[in-house]
Image (cartoon, rainbow, N blue to C red):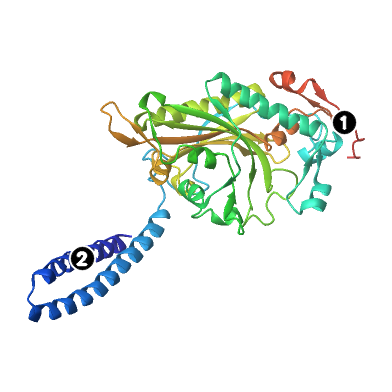
Amino acid sequence: MLELDASRRSALTRFESLRAEQKSVGKSVSKASPEEREELLRQAKSLAAEVKEAEAEAGRLADELDAVLARVPNIVQPDAPEGGVDDFRVVETVGEPRSFDFTPRDHLELGEMLGAVDMERGAKVSGARFYFLTGVGAQLELALLNMAMNQAVQAGFTPMIPPVLVKPETMEGTGFLGEHSDEVYHLDDDDLYLVGTSEVPLAGYHAGEILPADALPNRYIGWSPCFRREAGSYGKDTRGIIRVHQFNKVEMFVYTHPDQADEEHLRLLAWEREMLDKLDLPYRVVDIAGGDLGTSAARKYDCEAWIPTQETYRELTSTSNCTDFQSRRLNVRFRDGQGKPRFAATLNGTLATTRWIVAILENHQREDGSVAVPEALRPYLGRDVLEPVVAPRKR
């Protein structure tokens, strides 16, 4: 990157020097004597070719530099744990995993008994890692997402249903076309990308704008379907709806003053925890290590719920502080107290997704295959218990 930057600067200097010389020669032609004019015209023609060549070289190097810069990730905050995927720090564990006096069923078996999940027909219609949510499954997801939307609106977020097809510059600006490009669906004929999170269109919502300082923090809550290719996940979580190609998600997205981004990050985490607490799910909060952060995140916290049949914690929420990384690429600014434009900080956080159904079914199941609905969810779902519609398998 530094070598390209030096080469680009050198090429730009050469171009500007040649162009200045070309202009000087051009001015001399009209003042020259007939004997001198022919030589000056020859020089001007030669310089024109050199200027064109130098301009093209400077442009080529600028494009190469931009391509390299686009792959440079955000700067990791110093307090983030060092290391890779297994080096996260457990910040807090909330609730105790439930002790069952029967052998618990996994979410797919429960979903089939409840008439809530149909993987077989999902695969028939669309292929592996697709599914139908049916009956109470569809109702459960709508109830969960509506509950999340309502919580966010009450906290002052503006509700949004964004487009899920975005232009390359929007996907690139959020940092999803670098190391994550193989996860993204692309429509070649239209040159549009299907988003894997509403973070992408919400980050592009104010692209190229200067926001008034008193508008910050500017909080949005987006509800959208999300699409991920799950490249490289062959053989992982093939059973059920944990790792799928399409799901629904309610996502918090915030533009704020860079000096307030760390505090806002903790607020987003608190709102995620509020949702998990309402659903009476045992979970832990983890601080993700620097080597496991995505391109745009400077710091990230995940909330992982206990999944009884797997006897482990699995990610349900993630909240990232992207500082001014995305706003620089998308040119989102605000005016500070002196009226000077500055790049805003952007943050995002999950408030509910389809995957939450896994934790709800498994943690609140009963021996007969029914599932107790968490009290806070009952007004949205209109029932206290999900009853089986298919006889349980012999165990």
Three-letter residue code for mark 2:
Arg
Q: Position of residue 319 (x, y in %)?
A: 51, 35
Query: Which secondary structure, mark 1?
Result: loop
Quadrant location of the N terminus in the rendered image = bottom left
Q: Position of residue 25 (x, y in %)?
A: 14, 70
Q: Position of residue 44 (x, y in %)?
A: 19, 74
Quadrant location of the C terminus in the rendered image = top right
Q: Pick the residue in front: 78 or 220.
A: 220
Which residue corresponds to mark 1? 388
Vertical placement of residue 220 versus 314, above or below? above
Can residue 287 be seen? no
Which residue corresponds to mark 2? 19
User: Image point 64% across, 28% down: which residue?
Assistant: 282
Tag on residue 173?
A: none
Q: Pick the residue in front: 9 or 30.
A: 30
Vertical placement of residue 365 versus 194, above or below? above
Q: CA distance from mark 2 to mark 1?
A: 79 Å
